[in-house]
Image (cartoon, rainbow, N blue to C red):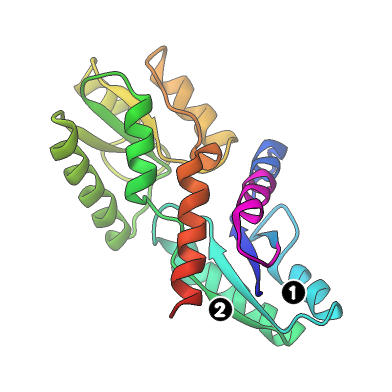
Amino acid sequence: MIDVVLLSHGSPDPRAQDAAIDLARSVEANLAGGRVHCAFLQHGRSLTDVCESLAAQGIDRVVVVPAFVTPAFHVRVDVPAAVQAAETISGITVTVTEPIGADSAIIAAIDEALPPGPVVLAVAGTRDRAAQQTLDDVAMQWSKRRGHVVTVAHASQGSPTLDEALDTDPEASVAALVLFPGVLPDRIARQAAGRYVTQPVSTLPATTRTVLDRVAELRGA
């Protein structure tokens, strides 16, 4: 079977890389054949490095799953650039799935962890309008299912900011839509100032299942 590479942004915080590796192991344990490797756009082993190593083992094709929650700049620009470089240098054919994204199963698992009431959906933030619309659509559908308002808030760039959203609704709990631990979820927890905050989603069984679904969709195409 074809090997899989989980491609994430990377972080100087070692917890993020450790969590990415743990997710890869969880996916591999449930994958019907093939191995799962980790690669990073920054602060870790690059996709080119991984592909060169696999090419030396006789592997000629891999499937890459972008470990991102929105189809923003990294998915549209950085991931294709990394794939092109890896193919050119290693000679391996790289096929890319849809990103992990804000999958409905992941959102449902986050919802189960939250106390009743309104929710602030805390994201890294982006100026990409398509990505913003994706998040707004997620929040709208989630609001309908939950029966309470779900508001998207941006922790680093974009509007409303996390502070603005929290000030608007003092009763809301915080759903941190981030994959791995690190600087961003720590910042979200600090800004939440004692409110209930969900943990990074990489450890959720739903996230493992979503990665497996992305691979299965591509393999079946």
- Tag 1: amino acid: Cys
| Highlighted range, magenta | 20-35
Return the mark for residue 30: none
Which residue carries the number 1 mark?
A: 51
The secondary element bearing badge 1 is classed as: helix
Note whether 81 is above or below 92 in the view shown. Answer: above
Quadrant assignment for the C terminus: bottom left
By secondary structure, the bulk of the magenta-drawn segment is best described as: helix
Of residues 220 and 86, the one drawn nearer to the viewer in this rendering: 220
Q: Which residue is depicted at the point 68% across and 49% down?
A: 25
Q: Which residue is depicted at the point 40% across and 61% down?
A: 72
Return the mark for residue 95: 2
Q: Which residue is depicted at the point 48% across and 51% down?
A: 209
**Residue 188 in the figure: left or right of residue 27:** left
**Residue 69 in the figure: left or right of residue 91:** left
Instruction: Using the rendered view, name the quadrant where residue 64 is placed.
Output: bottom right
Q: List x then y, in percent, for residue 188.
A: 45, 28
